[in-house]
Image (cartoon, rainbow, N blue to C red):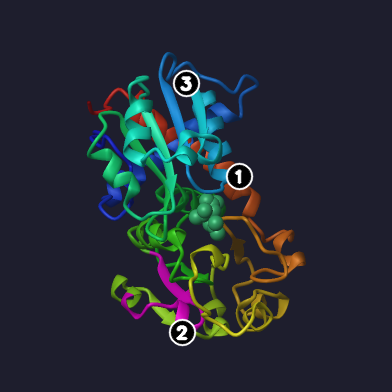
Amino acid sequence: MEWRRRHVLGLYDFRPEEIEFVVDTARSMEEVLTRDIKKVPALRGKTVVNLFFEASTRTRTSFEMAGKRLSADVVNFSSSTSSITKGETLLDTARNIEAMKPSVIVIRHAASGAPHFLSRHVSCSIVNAGDGANEHPTQGLLDLYTILKAKGSVAGRKIAIVGDILHSRVVRSDLHSLGKMGAKLWLCGPATLLPREMGRTGATLTCDIREAVKDADVVIMLRIQLERQKTAYFPSLREYSRMYGLNRSVFSLAKEDAVIMHPGPINRGIELSDDLADCGNSLVLRQVESGVAVRMAILYLLAGGSHAAH
Ligand code: NCD
C-alpha cells in the first residue's frame, strides 16, 4: 500500500487497509524498541512539535519518546507557560510555530475540530492527539494494536466499552479502529451518557454492565470526563461506581481469558477496582507500551516514510 495521508486528524475516513498498514509499521517500530540501542535515524533533521492545550501524561510523553526514538528533534509546548495566557489565538500560535519549520505538529485541544482547522492553515503535517469529545486517533490505533498483540485477532470478538460514552473521544476512535476490523462492539453507560445515535455505527448499546461484559473478550473502561460535563448526568460518583464500575463479580461474567483495558488516567475505585487495575488480565501498561510503537509508526509515515506525501 502507498501511504498518501499528510495528516492524521481522525480514523473516521481511514480504510481498513490503511489501519492494517499502520499496525504493520508499528510492528517494525516495536522491533526497534527491543534493541539495546532503541534509536533509528529515520527522522534525523526533522522536528516534531507537541502542542498541548489540555492536560496529558501518557500521550505527550509517548509522542515525545516516539519522536526521539526516530531521532527527530522534539519540542514540547504547553499552553500554561505560553503566550496563549497573554491572549494569542490558536492560529497565531500555530503560524508562529510553523515559521520555525517543523515537519509535524501534534495537537491536543479542548475544542473538537481544532486539528482540522489547523490543517487548513499550515503546511506541515498535523496529528490529532485528542480534540474535545471528537477523536483520539492514535489511542484508537494503539488499542487495536494492543488487542491484536494479546489476542491475535479482533474480528468477531466481543469488545465492551463502558463508561462516559457521550464525552469520550477514545470511544469515537475505537469505534473506527476496532469496528472496521470486524469487532462486535458493545457500548455501555448510564442512559444520559449513552447517545442513541451511536447505535448507527453498528455497535450494540446497553445500560446494563452485566449484559455488556457477559462473554466479552475485551472490556475497555473509560473515565468519567467531569471536565467536559456541564450538568449532572448521574446522582453521585458513588452511585455511578456501584452501577458501572468494573469489579471482580462483574468481570467474572466475561470470558475466562478476557482482558481489561483503560486509556488512563484511571480513577481507581470509580470505574475500575484497585485489584482489577493491577491484575494479570489488565493490559493497561501494555497499552502505554504499544503507544510508543504506534506513534513512531504515525510520525514515520507522515514525516519520514519513503511514501510520505508532500
Ligand atoms: C484519554 C484522553 O485524554 O482522551 N487519555 C489518554 O489520552 N490516554 C482518556 C481520558 O482522559 O480519560
Q: Which residue is mark 2?
A: 191
Q: Assess whether mark 2 and mark 1 are in contact (beta carbons under 8 angstroms).
A: no
Q: Is residue 184 magenta?
A: yes
Q: Which residue is mark 3?
A: 72
Q: Is residue 216 above or below residue 261?
A: below
Q: Which of label 1 and label 3 is nearer to you?
A: 1
- Seen at 35% across and 27% down, the residue is 96
Q: Quadrant of residue 307?
A: top left
- Seen at 56% across and 31% down, the residue is 65
Q: Using residue 303 as the reference point, say whether residue 225 is left or right of it.
A: right
Compute the Cα span from label 1 to label 3: 20 Å
Quadrant where the C terminus is found in the figure: top left
Q: Which residue is mark 1?
A: 57
Q: Of the residues shown, which amino acid type is indicated by label 2?
A: Ala
Q: Residues within 10 Å of mark 2 (few under 14, many from 20)?
A: some
Using the image as rendered, state which of residue 4 and residue 83 is in the foreground: 83
Q: Residues within 10 Å of mark 1 (few under 14, many from 20)?
A: few
Q: Of the residues shown, which amino acid type is indicated by label 1?
A: Thr
From this viewpoint, is residue 221 visible?
no
From this viewpoint, is residue 256 visible?
yes
Q: Position of residue 277 (x, y in %)?
A: 70, 62
Q: Residue furthest front?
A: 86
User: Residues in magenta?
Assistant: 183-197
Q: Of the residues shown, which amino acid type is indicated by label 3?
A: Ala
Q: Position of residue 282 (x, y in %)?
A: 66, 59
Q: Position of residue 100 (x, y in %)?
A: 37, 19
Cβ of disc 1 within 8 Å of ligand 1? yes
Q: Is residue 242 above or below residue 33?
A: below
Q: Position of residue 99 (x, y in %)?
A: 33, 21
